[in-house]
Image (tube, grey):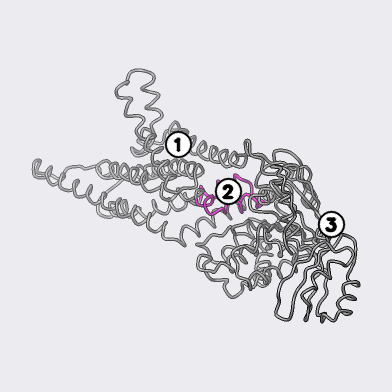
Amino acid sequence: MKSTLAIMGKELRVLFNSPMAYVVTAIFILISGYLFYSIVLFASSQSMQILRVQGALPQINLNDLIFRPTFHNMAVILMLTLPLITMRLLAEEKKIKTIELLMTSPVPLLAIVMGKYLAAMAVFTLMLGLTAYMPLLMWYYGSIQWMPILTGYLGIWLLGGVFIAVGLLASSLTENQIIASFISFGAVLILWLIGWISQGVADTSLGSFLTYLSIGEHTENFIRGMIDTEDLVYLATLIIVGIFITHRVLESQRWK
Amino acid sequence: MINVQNLTKRYGDLTAIEDVTFNVQKGEILGFLGPNGAGKTTTMRILTCFLPATSGTASVAGYDIFEQPQDVKKHIGYLPESPPLYTELTVTEYLRFISRIKGIERKDRTEALTRVLERCALTDVRHRLIGNLSRGYRQRVGLAQALIHNPEVLILDEPTTGLDPKQIIEMRQVIKELAGQHTVILSTHILPEATAVCQRVVIIHKGRIVAVDTPDTLSAQLRQSEKIRLTLRTPSPETAEALKTVPGVVSIFQEPSTDGQVFMVECELGRDIRTELAAQAVRRGWGLLELTAVKLSLEDVFLQLTQEESKQEEPKEDALNGEPG
């Protein structure tokens, strides 16, 4: 535990002493903010239209109208940005040979992997936290329900957790950061798209299996405001499996 | 302190080291000498539990490297060939991180840090980013990293590569000071370094140990003939011929020097002919300036051992030992 925190602390220092964490966070905030703004614009023009036709202010559900698409956008942006945070985690250590230092220190291998995972999670949590202005704005100027927003954040947080676990695994496979980021981006995209084919094979058991595998399917409930144990189990399993395989990969690389 | 037995490491078909066996006593500095690719780094990586060996055993500070790797790691300080540094951290940040992962107690960390900064002369640069330091400083940070938890055993992989001559001398001084309290294994392909720093030398070639001994004994053992260096101020043209008549002389090489002529006299092994040579020189009035027995340097030993090895592999007829002194 102590050594996990040591590794995590070092990782955060490295991330924040270099421009990487700032750049990725800034880009994430910029794009998600821009898309949020465009959604708000669209929603307000729509409600103006309804107002003109019906002659009365309609009951609009801001959660549905604004936050569902916003969370969906966040998921896509994270798919593109989180690999940039995770790519260096292990690939860089291998490239500059500092992995030798970690592996010859009295630190369990799991502490190294967990320290790295938690560091990336901390950066990601910060990124996500910075988007809190969105619900706060809507709450100040309109009326929103907080619970569905919190479950939505939980869903996105777990989704990001899966992206980071996949990214960490990709980073353990190579010493080239660009390859690592591409592998993790590709793997995450496949997880995302795997359900699409199920529409063609909808009524077979394969179709429902593919739908089950699809990661988007399992975040949808959170965004709608529901916490389903099935989704929790699915996302947690992916995270644990990602970390476990990373551990095995690092262990097996010693034996080559 | 370190006990290595029949260590073998294979990568597929390639044998990196084979049947490596040696011991290191407490407080000793052992030189690991060999050309590039001889298996020095592989051996060190096995001892530091970074790589598993294919077969054989080893123990460091009383702990088995296969059974108790965590204990071994606690008692070893390791400086790999390229110092493992995070260029985005400052020297202090880096060493604090190291002290945490080496398991130094929180209350002892500051003291350990101050001590190691002083010992490696890093106090002035402690707040600078490692990425902005020169090669010499980086190497010292690497050494500081290996020393911070005051380990019993230090394993240094080519600690002086890439340093300028002044830094090399400083680094060697630091390493020499480590002897006694720490047991040190140091690898190098620079031969004078082994002579200057190490008490004992292991010569490794193509994954096999070809010799283990003190630098002095090694050169004595491998001398196939004695060489004597004779400097004369006023030699006559027939001096070389005259020297050859001295009993025991095998051959003579001449080379000019600033104050007269140097004669390298090679003579039979185990026969000291210095008195006879001196007598000759005085009697004939050659102006004797210098008369010294030339020791075979470690460099010669090294070349001889590694060449003998290759000769055995691809036998050639011309086994002439014709290198002039």
Chain ID for label 1? Answer: A
Image coordinates of residue B165 in percent, x first then y, are 63, 71
Q: Which mark is residue A112?
A: 2
In the foreground, B322 or B246: B246
Image coordinates of residue B136 in percent, x first then y, are 59, 68
Residue position marked by numbered label 1 in the rendering: A235
In the foreground, B260 or A96: B260
User: What's under tag 3, amino acid-wise?
Assistant: Gln
Mark 3 touching mark 1, by CB under 8 A?
no
> Separation of disc 3 and disc 1 at Cα?
69 Å
Residue B70 in view in this figure: no
Q: Which mark is residue A22?
A: none
The chief SS type of the magenta part is: helix
> Separation of disc 2 and disc 3 at Cα?
49 Å
Residue range in magenta is A92-118
In the foreground, B279 or A165: B279
Earlier-in-chain disc, 2 versus 1: 2
Q: Secondary structure at mark 1?
A: helix
User: What's under tag 2, amino acid-wise?
Assistant: Ile
Using the image, determine if residue A209 lies above or below residue B62.
above
> Separation of disc 2 and disc 1 at Cα?
22 Å
- As drawn, is A214 to the left or to the right of B183? left
